[in-house]
Amino acid sequence: MNLPGNSGLHLYKLKKSEPKGLTRNIGNFLRFLEAISFSHGSVLNISNVARECQIERKVVESYISILEDLLLAFRIPVFSRRAKRALSSHPKFYFFDAGVYLALCPSGPLDRPEETGGAALEGLVAQHLRAWIDYRNKDCRLYFWRTSSGNEVDFILYGKDVFWAIEVKHTATVHPRDLRSLKTFGQDYPEAKRTLLYRGPEKLSRDDIIIQSCEEFFGELR
């Protein structure tokens, strides 16, 4: 993975735009980290994050750039090649490590463990896919797919010899509704290999969609 060469520039811009500097605004940065944790594994809306932590949008953009320059976070864009439907324009956001997300995301009586676990599992899959691309398929790119009507496939891998649609479900049982987005994607892109990853033990096939455990999938990647 190549290190970005402009991390110092982002830090410089942040200090210029914030007279007191990052170190004197640690409270703002901590509020930002908590607010951005809710965007892990989700479509990133910077304006909503800025509103949540009561910080200017341009400062939030600088904070996100710092996380990315330090390789602590990354964004993946929407797959739009030969699009047949109206698509979302915002990227998805992830921390580089699911453990970092779990450490930053607040938990309490109103927070459901299955939601946190689902985002963490999706982030773990993203980590493995990015490592696989860097080590095995450098011409491949990682995307996600989301239509304006709300159909979403978590990951699209697209490269010279790779076209893969992957959905991640934090469940041990697969229901027909869990396959809906992959089926829709298959209607637009019948060339794609479609896979649903879940927490169950069995490897299945339904409507040309492979269903397998995350553990088995990780083993096959290696």
Image (cartoon, rainbow, N blue to C red):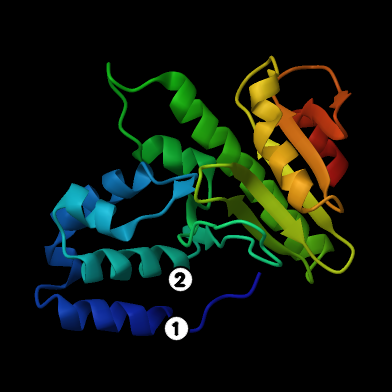
- In primary-sequence order, the first of circles 1 and 2 is 1
Looking at the image, is 23 positioned above or below residue 28? Answer: below
Looking at the image, is 98 positioned above or below residue 136? Answer: above
Question: What residue is rendered at 24% in x and 76% in y?
Answer: 14
Location of residue 30 in the rendering, given as x and y in whole percent from the top left corner: 23, 50
Displayed quadrant of residue 24: bottom left
Q: Amino acid at mark 2?
A: Asp
Q: Amino acid at mark 1?
A: Asn
Distance from disc 1 to disc 2, alpha carbons, whole Å, reads 7 Å
Location of residue 36 in the rendering, given as x and y in whole percent from the top left corner: 33, 49
Question: What residue is rendered at 28% in x and 21% in y?
Answer: 108
Looking at the image, is 75 positioned above or below residue 14? Answer: above
Circles 1 and 2, Cβ within 8 Å, touching? The answer is: yes
Q: Is residue 15 left or right of residue 166?
A: left
Looking at the image, is 146 positioned above or below residue 135? Answer: above
Q: Which mark is residue 6?
A: 1
For the residue pair 33 and 206, the one nearer the viewer reads as 206
The crowd level at tag 1 (other Cα within 10 Å; few <14, some 14-19, many 20+) is few
Q: Identify residue for label 2.
A: 69
Q: Image quadrant for the N terminus?
A: bottom right
Q: Which mark is residue 19?
A: none
Disc 1, SS: loop
**Residue 208, visible in the rendered structure:** yes
The count of marks equals 2
Location of residue 187 in the rendering, given as x and y in whole percent from the top left corner: 77, 46
Question: What residue is rendered at 36% in x and 64% in y?
Answer: 64
